[in-house]
Image: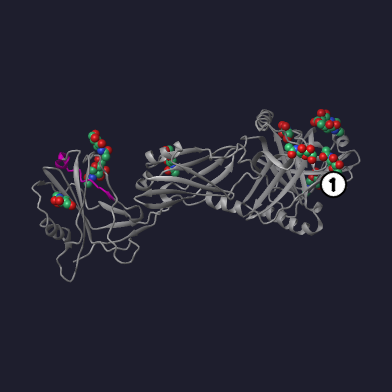
């Protein structure tokens, strides 16, 4: 009733010679307005009226904004109509009209998104026909410029270039078409890319909805080793600058992750396990990957004379770093144990606090890095993320009893209860221990028993007995049905654990970045803030 009323009044204000075709679209047709990218979208809901198929591909469209003044009753268009032409119109296949460069006059609030609109009149007309669509409902979508791309925007760095993956939302066509430059800051170093870079030209030209751009960029003036890094994860920010008619617009980019890409999958099933106040890391390299690493190092034209194995454990925004320094890379060094009790005495409390935090945390990230130095200059790095295998026992160790070797499994709060009716496999690997590391594997022993949750389980094997007469590191893998538990421990046969750790560096308080990475990865993708501007009025 009200629609008809409005329509009659409005129609009388236009003087079209064309034949009018009624009811091409239903009342479900809505408008969405994105003020900051100056875009109006009319989402057409077709009534499938065959009479409307008569429109040619080239049609004119007028958009008229109006508001009803209740005091005077007579509605009148407040602003002259927006007029534009499209050339690919098809009644059966055009489901949206996108009007770029559309803006509502300022209502004085300055925000441009609280304007009172009572209706939009959309006129689609050709030389001979016209149809009119009234829209009494309009949504304003606050489309921030950060919505130009989906939030999954990983950045990867290799030694001499960076790659940014951008998936376009299509919302910022106008801005991106006048792209001027890209600016990115990585760990405090700023890099700029202008339009002479082909990937930026491609972005400006082909920006469209759901188009994925993989932009590989070499920063100007950067030495080949610019991105060699101490860290697997970086801190980076970036933005695009567009320039149009003297107006500069900054489009902030939200990187979902920034990673230094090393040789992928360098280790076979690397993991961290905890035992008795110790952080134990197992990193068995894959031989073919070692050859790749050697080639990467050789490509630097320099040879290293120092290396650091660095393990970083991050949880709850805190992190600890454990370093093992050595001269040459030794692929047989595959296990590293760092014990809180070997820390300087003033660090031990904090170390144990951190250890206990990791034990109960659901959010643990562990990285393993190999860093190669020529004197003090970093010339290459290999970074990997490794998994954390939660412990079942807080403390495991061997004790010999006569001709038997007994494994003690201590837990004050067992998480898993073994079913003695089901066999349990104890797989024990023994490695020779040198300082905090294990060199090679000297023997693997597999025992099957019906373990009943006791804190002691004994086996008989003379070879094992002999092997643990020297310093050793033992890897224990316990399998029970589909459950697997990992422990690493070290010691000598008399249980007198020798603590001769070489280096264990603790770096406090630098874990905040890890927390940021985590929160971003769970970031809500493409948040839309919808505001219903107008509802139908009853008159
Ligand atoms: C028009 O046709 C489309 C698909 O053929 C259908 O989804 C839609 O519901 C129809 N609209 C009306 C108003 O019948
Ligand atoms: C569309 O708007 C233009 C001016 O903005 C006007 O000249 C023209 O008559 C309008 N067309 C119709 C069908 O109202
Ligand atoms: C609709 O179909 C016509 C003819 O197939 C085509 O020329 C036109 O580009 C299409 N329009 C859209 C918006 O897909
Ligand atoms: C990103 O782009 C790809 C390829 O164009 C597309 O299939 C995918 O749906 C897009 N991703 C998102 C999050 O929209
Ligand atoms: C590395 O240190 C050694 C000993 O201090 C020195 O002789 C050598 O020149 C240094 N190499 C480089 C490349 O700085
Ligand atoms: C025991 O562990 C070693 C190394 O961890 C592995 O190679 C071997 O296959 C395992 N044996 C069994 C029976 O699970
Ligand atoms: C083990 O540590 C000692 C001193 O703590 C050191 O002299 C020795 O070189 C280290 N061995 C290896 C293989 O790193
Ligand atoms: C253990 O293995 C390493 C390297 O594989 C070897 O050097 C060492 O002698 C072995 N130790 C024993 C006790 O067999
Ligand atoms: C001890 O274990 C080793 C390796 O599994 C095996 O070869 C050997 O036969 C075992 N010895 C005895 C006495 O069971
Ligand atoms: C569990 O097994 C151990 C030997 O492995 C045995 O000494 C102990 O009595 C058993 N406990 C129960 C409750 O069966």
> Which one is nearer the viewer's eye here, 441 or 306?
306
Q: Does the Cβ of the disc 1 residue fall within 8 Å of ligand 7?
A: yes
51 part of magenta stretch: yes
Residue at x 29%, y 51% (from the top left corner): 101
Q: Tally the numbered discs.
A: 1
Q: Position of residue 371 (x, y in %)?
A: 70, 40
Residue at x 20%, y 43% (from the top left corner): 48
- The answer to whether residue 79 is above or below residue 312 is below
Does residue 230 appear in the picture of this structure? yes
State the SS at label 1.
Answer: loop
Label 1: how many residues lie within 10 Å, few (<14), some (14-19) or many (20+)?
few
Does residue 427 appear in the picture of this structure? no
Q: In the rendered view, does 201 fall on the left or right side of 355?
A: left
- The answer to whether residue 209 is above or below residue 132 is above
Dividing the picture into quarters, in which one does residue 458 lie?
top right
Dividing the picture into quarters, in which one does residue 377 lie?
top right
Residue at x 80%, y 36% (from the top left corner): 431
- Would you name the residue on which mark 1 appears? 500
Quarter the C terminus occupies: bottom left
Q: Give ligand 9's quarter of the image.
A: top right
Quarter the N terminus occupies: bottom left
Q: In the rendered view, does 536 fall on the left or right side of 497?
A: left
Q: Position of residue 449 (x, y in %)?
A: 76, 38
> Which one is nearer the viewer's eye here, 211 or 444?
211
Q: Position of residue 380 (x, y in %)?
A: 67, 37
Residue extent of the magenta highlight = 41-54
């Amino acid at each position: 009733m009200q629609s008809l009323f409005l329509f009659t009044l409005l129609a009388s204000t236009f003087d079209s010679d064309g034949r009018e075709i009624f009811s091409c679209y239903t009342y479900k047709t809505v408008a969405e307005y994105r003020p900051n990218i100056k875009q109006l979208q009319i989402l057409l809901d077709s009534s499938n009226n065959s009479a409307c198929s008569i429109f040619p591909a080239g049609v004119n469209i007028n958009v008229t904004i109006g508001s009803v003044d209740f005091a005077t009753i007579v509605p009148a268009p407040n602003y002259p109509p927006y007029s534009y032409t499209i050339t690919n119109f098809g009644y059966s296949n055009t489901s949206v009209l996108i009007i770029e460069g559309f803006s509502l006059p300022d209502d004085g609030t300055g925000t441009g998104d609280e304007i009172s609109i009572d209706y939009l009149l959309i006129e689609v007309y050709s030389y001979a026909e016209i149809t009119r669509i009234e829209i009494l409902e309009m949504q304003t979508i606050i489309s921030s410029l950060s919505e130009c791309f989906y939030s999954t925007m990983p950045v990867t760095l290799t030694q001499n270039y960076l790659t940014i993956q951008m998936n376009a939302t299509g919302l910022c066509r106008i801005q991106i078409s006048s792209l001027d430059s890209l600016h990115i800051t990585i760990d405090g170093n700023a890099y700029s890319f202008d339009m002479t870079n082909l990937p930026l030209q491609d972005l400006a030209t082909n920006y469209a909805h759901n188009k994925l751009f993989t932009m590989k960029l070499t920063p100007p003036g950067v030495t080949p080793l610019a991105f060699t890094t101490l860290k697997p994860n970086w801190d980076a920010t970036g933005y695009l600058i567009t320039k149009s008619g003297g107006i500069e617009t900054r489009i902030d980019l939200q990187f979902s992750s920034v990673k230094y890409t090393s040789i992928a999958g360098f280790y076979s099933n690397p993991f961290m396990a905890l035992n008795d106040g110790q952080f134990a890391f197992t990193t068995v390299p894959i031989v073919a990957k070692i050859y790749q690493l050697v080639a990467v190092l050789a490509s630097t034209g320099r040879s290293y004379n120092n290396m650091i194995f660095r393990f970083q454990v991050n949880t709850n925004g805190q992190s600890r770093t454990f370093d093992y320094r050595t001269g040459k890379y030794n692929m047989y060094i595959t296990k590293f144990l760092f014990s809180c009790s070997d820390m300087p005495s003033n660090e031990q409390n904090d170390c144990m606090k951190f250890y206990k935090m990791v034990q109960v945390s659901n959010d643990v990230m562990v990285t393993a890095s190999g860093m190669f130095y020529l004197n003090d200059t970093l010339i290459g790095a290999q970074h990997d993320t490794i998994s954390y295998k939660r412990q079942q026992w807080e403390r495991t160790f061997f004790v010999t009893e006569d001709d038997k070797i007994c494994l003690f499994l201590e837990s004050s709060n067992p998480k898993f209860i073994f079913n003695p009716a089901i066999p349990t496999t104890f797989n024990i690997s023994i490695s020779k221990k040198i300082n905090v590391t294990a060199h090679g594997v000297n023997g693997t022993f597999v025992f099957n028993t019906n373990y009943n949750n006791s804190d002691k389980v004994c086996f008989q094997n003379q070879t094992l007995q002999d092997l643990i007469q020297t310093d050793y590191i033992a890897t224990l893998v316990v399998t029970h049905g589909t459950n697997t538990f990992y422990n690493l421990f070290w010691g000598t046969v008399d249980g007198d654990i020798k603590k001769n750790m070489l280096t264990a560096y603790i770096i406090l308080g630098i874990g905040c970045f890890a927390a940021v990475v985590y929160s971003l990865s769970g970031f809500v993708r493409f948040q839309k803030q919808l505001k219903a501007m107008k509802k139908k009025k009853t008159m």
